[in-house]
Image (cartoon, rainbow, N blue to C red):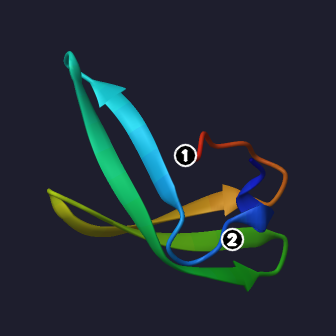
Amino acid sequence: MKIQELKQGDKITQHLDNSTILFEVLSIKQIGRRFLVTFRSAYGIATASYQGDSFITAI
């Protein structure tokens, strides 16, 4: 899924050290040609910046 198509509530998974971490999209905001995406996981809340045409695996 393209970053620009993400919506609040979408779920993302990442495999790290033989475990799967689930991230939930809390918000997505366009700033120019980039998107700021705020995620929540078991490790807390974090925001990342992506180009709109970047891809991410959503479930």
- Pick the residue in front: 59 or 42: 59
Residue marked by disc 1: 59
Q: Quadrant of residue 50?
A: bottom right
Label disc, if present, on residue 35 of the rendered structure: 2
Location of residue 57 in the rendering, given as x and y in whole percent from the top left corner? 60, 39
Which residue appears at 76% of the width and 46% of the height?
Answer: 54
Tag 2 secondary structure? strand
- Pick the residue in front: 47 or 3: 3
Q: Residues within 10 Å of mark 2 (few under 14, many from 20)?
A: some
Which residue appears at 84% of the width and 71% of the height?
Answer: 33
In the rendered image, the vertical position of residue 38 relative to residue 21, given as above or below: below
Q: Amino acid at mark 2?
A: Phe
Which residue appears at 78% of the width and 64% of the height?
Answer: 5
Location of residue 38 in the rendering, given as x and y in whole percent from the top left corner? 45, 73
- Pick the residue in front: 51 or 11: 11
Tag 1 secondary structure? loop
